[in-house]
């Protein structure tokens, strides 16, 4: 085999080896999960600082919030085993169908989180005490049937 004939194979082999090890293929569902977790982490940072807008903070506090948000986002990426660069590149190259699937999955995750939060804050209605009245008396008169045209009397 001549050098000219082997050159395309060598280039192809080098290109295959040059791919970064962290370059992973994502699914729209994974993208939605990562985005959801990232939003939750950033929301926690905002809540820790009183949900202030950047204009309401001094420079030092603003810098601290930015650093904490970056650290929170990086922690989410590390938790899911992806690099921020690969995630952003994949997100930018997603097709319209993949974007729609990711958006639908993200909405589903948001609704699930809201339902869990509502379930935790709402007491169990089956556990509340129901008063049971034993019969009728003068304080609580009751009549089971009213014949039509008959006058109702209270004792």
Image (spheres, grey):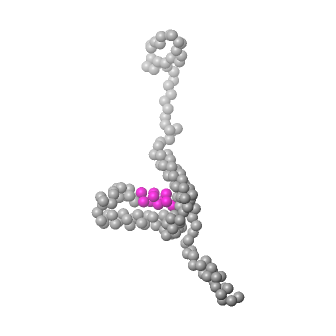
Q: Residue furthest front?
A: 4
Magenta stretch: residue 42 in it?
Answer: yes
- The answer to whether any part of residue 96 appears in the image is yes
Q: Is the magenta stretch mostly helix, strand or loop?
A: helix
- Per the rendered image, the range of residues in magenta is 34-43
Residue 8, image x and y in percent? 64, 82
Quarter in which the C terminus is drawn:
top left
Looking at this view, is 49 or 96 the one in front? Answer: 96
Q: Is residue 69 magenta?
A: no
Q: Position of residue 133 (x, y in %)?
A: 50, 25
* Residue 29 horizontal side relative to residue 38, left or right: right
Residue extending furthest toward the bottom: 2
Q: Which residue is drawn at 62% across and 79% down?
A: 12
Rendered position, 105 above or below 82 = above
Query: Where residue 132 sits in the image (x, y, percent)?
Result: 50, 28
Dividing the picture into quadrants, the one containing residue 138 is top left
In this rendering, does residue 109 appear at all? no
Residue sitting at 55 percent across and 75 percent down? 20
Q: Residue at x 45, y 58 (%)?
A: 39
Residues 47 and 2: in front is: 2
């Amino acid at each position: 085999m001549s050098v000219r004939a082997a050159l395309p194979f060598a280039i192809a082999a080098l290109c295959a080896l040059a791919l970064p090890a962290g370059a992973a293929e994502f699914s729209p569902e994974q993208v939605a999960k990562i985005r959801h977790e990232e939003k939750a982490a950033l929301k926690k940072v905002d809540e820790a600082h009183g949900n202030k807008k950047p204009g309401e903070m001094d420079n030092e506090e603003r810098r601290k919030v930015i650093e904490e948000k970056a650290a929170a986002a990086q922690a989410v990426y590390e938790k899911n085993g992806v690099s921020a660069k690969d995630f952003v590149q994949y997100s930018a190259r997603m097709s319209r169908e993949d974007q729609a699937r990711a958006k639908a999955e993200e909405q589903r995750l948001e609704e699930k989180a809201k339902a869990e939060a509502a379930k935790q804050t709402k007491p169990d209605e089956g556990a509340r005490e129901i008063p049971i009245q034993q019969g009728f008396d003068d304080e609580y008169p009751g009549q089971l049937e009213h014949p039509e045209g008959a006058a109702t009397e209270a004792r």
